[in-house]
Image (cartoon, rainbow, N blue to C red):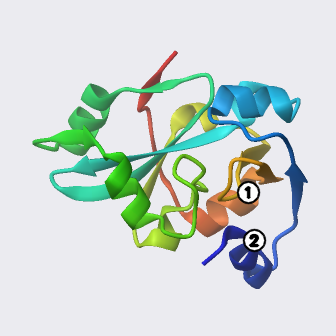
Amino acid sequence: MKIEEYLNQQGVKYDITKHKPTFSAQRMAAMEHEPGRFVAKPVLVKVDGTMVMCVLDANHKLDLKALKKSLGARSVDLASEDEVGSTCKDCEIGAEPPFGNLYDLDTIMDKALETDDHIVFQAGSHDKAIKMSMADYRKLAKPKIMALSYR
């Protein structure tokens, strides 16, 4: 399901903007004139063979060791592009929205995003962004929150 359809079905307010195609969260932050701390980048990982969506801000990198330790997992690996593409079929690779629930995945949000008032993310393509309240995002995505990144 496309993210816009989902948000409309859920009745939440959001803004959508169009920009030149961007292929990194940092670049999208610049195009959207948003500080990187508000721009979410989803990262798909395999935790003991099960796909999970981690969500962190554009200024941070995923700490696989911290994630593994926090989850008590035996293995944590980044998903391959093929795995991302076959999981998030309605999106361009690298432009997935931060809603694991749309893909039957658990969502884990980095603690660094926890106190932000809004969130900005790719809308399934490299040339669209969605901005919505963090409260609505958390209500819909129901992420687990843990420290899983470093600067």
Residue 65: x and y in percent read 25, 27
Residue at the spot 58% in from the left edge and 40% down from the top edge? 41
Q: Amino acid at mark 2?
A: Glu
Does residue 108 appear to the left or right of 21 in the view shown? left
Q: Residue under circle 1? A: 135
Element type at mark 1: helix
One can see residue 85 in this view? yes
Q: Are marks 2 and 1 in contact (CB under 8 Å)?
A: no
Q: Earlier in the sequence, mark 2 or mark 1?
A: 2
Q: Is residue 84 above or below residue 109?
A: below
Q: Choose between 93 and 26: the one closer to the eye.
A: 93
| Residue sticking out furthest to the top | 151
Which part of the image, by quadrant, shows the N terminus? bottom right
Q: Amino acid at mark 1?
A: Ala
Residue 87: x and y in percent read 40, 65
Mark 2 is surrounded, within 10 Å at the Cα level, by few (under 14), some (14 to 19) or many (20 or more) other residues, namely some
Residue 15's mark? Answer: none
One can see residue 34 in this view? no
Residue 82: x and y in percent read 34, 54
Does residue 141 appear to the left or right of 130 in the view shown? left
Q: Is residue 103 above or below residue 75?
A: below
Element type at mark 2: helix
Q: Choose between 78 and 52: the one closer to the eye.
A: 78
Residue at the spot 61% in from the left edge and 56% down from the top edge? 97
Residue 108: x and y in percent read 44, 49
How far apart, in angstroms, are the residues tagged by discs 2 and 1? Answer: 17 Å
Q: Residue under circle 2? A: 4
Q: Can you tell which quarter of the image residue 99 is in? A: bottom right
Residue at the spot 73% in from the left edge and 51% down from the top edge? 134
Callout count: 2
Looking at the rendered image, the disc whose residue lies closer to the viewer, 2 or 1, is: 2
